[in-house]
Image (spheres, helix red, strand yellow):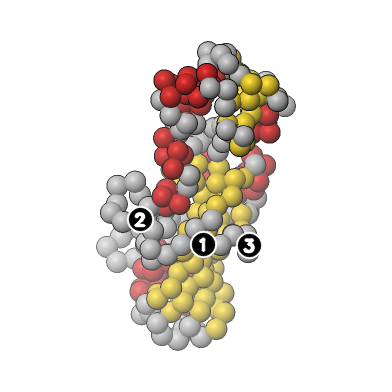
Amino acid sequence: MSKAMMARLDRLLANLGYGSRKDVQALVASGKVMLDGKVLKDSGARIAVDATLPERMTIRGLPVDPPAPLVLIMHKPLGVVCSHKEDGEKIYDLLPRRWRLRDPGLSTVGRLDKDTSGLILITDDGDFLHRVISPKRHVPKTYLATLDRPLAGTEAEVFAAGTLMLDGEEKPLLPAQLDVVDERTARLTITEGRYHQVRRMFAAVGNHVVGLHRERIGGLILPADLEPGQHRILSAEEAEGVFADV
């Protein structure tokens, strides 16, 4: 196990979103912060910080939030957006309010549009984020698509050929795998992340996606017991599982 990082208590808790440095100093002075069963009174004390911190520290009797690096898996519901800047309900609104104040901040690993549900990862680990979305890695993503019209039967061959051109682009798509579920439902696995790619692929073969749900990213599958809007913290080992199929 790597050596734990040391951090000032007030800076640590401020970076975890528990308030300003002044707020945190008052919180500590009130005796509401405990470490290893003992009340902490010195907000300037240096604390060993690693993944075990939530097992050792409590704030107002509750486990402290996990320190960075943090990776979450979420079941994104329909109707929410993944951008900090777009209008409407944001995916970050589904997280504890103080998490919006964390430093480093949380970002989605790629995006799902407002009308797409399913698996999305959220992290404050920039290195992890860029490794997942890097076009050099070709991390596969699997979607369940519900279609407006019955499949023609030729889509799997077209998508697998690696020659399909999307409207307005000059580079063909990489080969993709389509598995038919029924005449209006298909499971599509792609290894790129172009803008609205799945919807545009089906549009290119004369169909229209009326429902889209992401089931998998790499080796991570959306847990069956994770309801829309719910999230779960992944361990470092679980998060690395995204690269299992790469």
> Would you place residue 31 above or below residue 54 in this image?
above
Cα separation between marks 2 and 3: 23 Å
Residue 157 in percent (x, y) is at 50, 75
Please name whichever residue, 161 or 4, is drawn nearer the observer in this view of the structure: 4
**N-terminal-most mark, 1 or 2:** 2
Residue 238 image offset from top left, x and y in percent = 65, 46
Q: Which residue is mark 2?
A: 89
Dividing the image into 4 quarters, which one contains the N terminus? Answer: top right
Q: Which residue is mark 3?
A: 225
Rounded to the nearest angstrom, the CA distance separating label 3 from label 1 is 10 Å
Q: Earlier in the sequence, mark 2 or mark 3?
A: 2
CA–CA distance between discs 1 and 2? Answer: 14 Å
Q: Residue at x 55, y 78 (%)?
A: 180
> Mark 1 highlights which residue?
228
* Secondary structure of residue under mark 1: loop
Picture layout, residue 33 above or below residue 221: above
Q: Which mark is residue 63?
A: none
The residue carrying pointer 3 sits among few (fewer than 14), some (14 to 19) or many (20 or more) residues within 10 Å by Cα, namely: few
